[in-house]
Image (cartoon, rainbow, N blue to C red):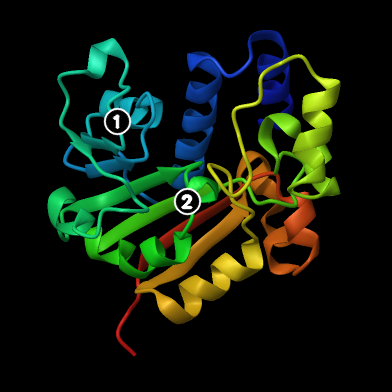
Amino acid sequence: MILPQLLWRFFKHRDDAVFYSMQAEDALRWLDACGLTLGPGLRVLDLGCGHGVFGACLARRGASVTFADAANQLMPEHRQSRFVAVDLDRDTDMIDRLGRGQYDLVICSNVLEHLAHPEAWLATAHELLSEKGHLYLSWTNWLSPWGGHEFSPLHYLGASVGPALYDRLSSRKRFHQPHVNLFPTYIGSILGTIRTASGLEVERAAPRYYTEFAFLMAIPGVREFLAWNCALLLRRKRAG
């Protein structure tokens, strides 16, 4: 369980590069445990890459990594890497621009809750994967302790009252605005979308920062509150 170390790092240094590297390396340990081979020859897409920390961890293992986001904010040491500018909410030609069926592993980490229409993206995400490719999808579900991001736990008061109260109580400027760049998402509804309206199926599911408690993901309602961040390992839906 890496959650205590992450909380300690966040309270001392906020969300710096080391914080995100800790997250990424822990996620890779989970993918290793799931049986994925992460190394040379692996074609990876770090989608919604931000500064590219997750993809950088895979590149150090020898994987061939493509980075993609709405704007190039890659760390200086990765500025020469392949980067594709895409907006997951707006670009209808995203699949063709990124490469149809080109990736053995697509990483989409802490992006879903920032999409206005996550179901539209999930409906086409499988088209990025090679025949035996996987999608690692993780996001902060709304009812989790960190669902409101910097104005947590006031988000439990609602998407209007919570942020407003935070602004009155805190001198720190708030970046996330509900229904603008932070959208309430729920594990149950996302799993429903994947099951009924996508070309994907769930191979593994776990609370991201304490994957030892994967059994929580099988308990509707409870998982919405006790999974700090939902992690799914998805694959192309098999025929039949």
Position of the C terminus by quadrant:
bottom left
Looking at numbered disc 2 in the image, what kind of residue is underneath it? Answer: Leu
The answer to whether 217 appears left or right of 50 in the picture is right
Mark 1 neighbour class, 10 Å CA radius: few under 14, some 14 to 19, many 20 or more: some
| Helix, strand or loop under label 1 | loop
Does residue 130 appear in this view?
Answer: no
Kindly identify which residue carries mark 1: 71
Residue at 82% over, 44% down: 161
Q: Horizontally, is 131 left or right of 11 in the view?
A: left
**Label located before the other in sequence (2 or 1):** 1
Q: Which of 212 and 185 is in front in this view?
A: 185
Badge 2 marks a residue whose secondary structure is loop
Left or right: where does residue 180 sit relative to residue 64? right
Q: Which amino acid does label 1 sit on?
A: Ala
Q: Nearer the viewer, residue 123 or 180?
A: 180
Q: Nearer the viewer, residue 36 or 222?
A: 222
Residue 65 x, y percent position in the rendering? 22, 35
Label 2 crowd bin: few (<14), some (14–19), many (20+), radius 10 Å: many
Q: Name the residue under label 2.
A: 115
